[in-house]
Amino acid sequence: MPDYLGLSDFDHASAPRTGVLLVNLGTPDSPSPGDVRRFLAEFLWDARVIESPRWLWWLILHGVILRIRPSKSAHAYQQIWTPQGSPLLLHTKALAVGLEKELTERLGQGRVVVGLGMSYGSPDIPGTLERMHREGVRRLIVLPLYPQYSGTTTASVFDRVTRTLQRFRWLPEFRFITQYHDDGAYIAALAASIQAHWQTHGRKHLLFSFHGVPRSYLLAGDPYHCQCLKTARLVSERLGLAEGDWSVSFQSQVGREEWLRPYTDELLLRYAKEGPKRISVVCPGFATDCLETLEEIEIRNRAPFLENGGEAYDYIPALNATPAHVQLLADLTLRHAQGWPVSEVADPQSKARAVRGGAGR
Ligand SMILES: C=CC1=C(C)c2cc3[nH]c(cc4nc(cc5[nH]c(cc1n2)c(C)c5CCC(=O)O)C(CCC(=O)O)=C4C)c(C)c3C=C
Ligand SMILES: [Fe+2]
Ligand SMILES: [Fe+2]
C-alpha cells in the first residue's frame, strides 16, 4: 500500500503560506576525499548530468572516476574551504535568509517561507520540502539558482522536486522558474557589479566564463548555450562595450568528450600570448561563488595567464547574497506568484467547523 506523506495533525486555523524553494547544485560536507567521493558519487550518477548508457557509465564511474577524482577534487576544495564550511553553501544560505527577509518585508510577517535545498548533498530537497509542507506551505515556487536553463541542472532540480511531491498526500500548488538569463534586473545587477569592480581595479577586457556542458547536449536541443550567449550580449550592451571588448568561454570540462567551446583555460592562454593581456573574468552562470569560480577561475587559471605574457587578471565575484541579488530574486519570485492570493489569511471560522463536523475547510 502506498504510504503518502500527510498531516494528520493539521491545524485548520492555520493560514496557508507561500513557499519559495531555492535550489543550488550542492557541495560536499567537508573537503575530505571521503566526503568528496560521496558527493561525486551522487552527482555523477544523475542521468541528467551524464547521459551515457547506465551500465557503461556505472563501470566507468565506479571503476575509474571515483577512484581518481575524489582526491584531486578534495585538494581543490581544501584551497577554498572556509572555517564556516563550503563557500557555495554559505553564500546560498545567506541568499535564502536575505530573500525570506525581503519577501517578508514586502508581503507581511509569516506569509512566506524560503527553504533551501541542494540537488546533491545536504540540505537535500526532500527534507526541505517536507519541512515547508509541515510549516503550512500550500503554494510553492521552485527557483533553481541557474539563470541559464540546462537539462543538466534545471531539469535535474525538476526531477528531484517532482519525485518528492509524488510522495505527498496533499500537493501544494506549484510553479517552477526555468530560467532568468535575460531578466532585466539580473542583467542590471551583473552590469553594476562589473562596473563597481572596474572602478576599484581598472577596466579590462571582459571574459564571460560559463560552466560547460558536452557539445552533444547543445546539438540535442539544450538551450543553455544560446542563453549564455544572450546573457553576455545583454550585459555587454548595458555596459556600452564594443565588440572586441568582451568574449565568452566555457569552463570546467570533465572527460574526453567535446564540450562547448572555446574552453576558458585555452582561451586565456591564447590571450596571454596574443592579447588582450589585461582581463577581468566574470561568471554570470554561478549565482554564488563556489569551487568552479574560486578555485578554477580565481586561483588555477591565474598563474598560467600571468606566466605566459598576461599582464593583469582579476575575477569579479558572483552576485552572492548582495542586496541587488536579493532584490532581483524577490522581484522574479513575485512575478511568478502572480494571481496567487499571497496575502490570504487564516479562516477564523474553519477551526470551529472542523471541530464540529470533521474536515471543515
Ligand atoms: C561531468 C559533468 C558535469 C556537467 C554536465 C556539469 C554541468 C554543470 N555544473 C554546474 C555547476 C556546478 N558544478 C560544480 C562542480 C562540479 N561539476 C562537475 C561536473 C559537471 N558539471 C563536477 C565533477 C563538479 C565537482 C567538482 C569537481 O570534481 O570538479 C559546482 C561547484 C560545487 C561546489 O561544491 O562548489 C557548480 C556550482 C552548472 C551550472 C552546469 C551546467 C550548466
Ligand atoms: Fe558542474
Ligand atoms: Fe543557439
Image (cartoon, grey):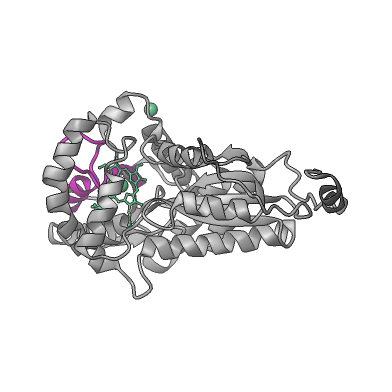
- Bounds of the magenta segment: 244-273
Establish if 193 lies above or below 141.
below
> Image quadrant for the C terminus?
top right
Identify the residue at image location x=76%, y=44%. Answer: 341
**Residue nearer the viewer, 151 or 248:** 151
Visible residue check, residue 162? yes
Whole-percent x, y for residue 270 in the image: 17, 47
Q: Which of 271 and 20 is in front in this view?
A: 20
Residue 227 pos. (x, y %):
43, 36
279 relative to 119 in the view: left or right: left
Query: Considering only vertical position in the picture, is 74 above or below 342?
Result: below
Residue 134 vs residue 17, the one in the foreground: 134
Which residue is at 81% across, 44% downward? 360
Quadrant assignment, res 78: bottom left
Question: Residue 47, percent across and down?
Answer: 31, 35
Disc tally is 0
Locate residue 148, reporting x and y percent. 44, 40
Can the viewer see residue 188?
no
Which residue appears farthest toward the top when viewing the image? 220
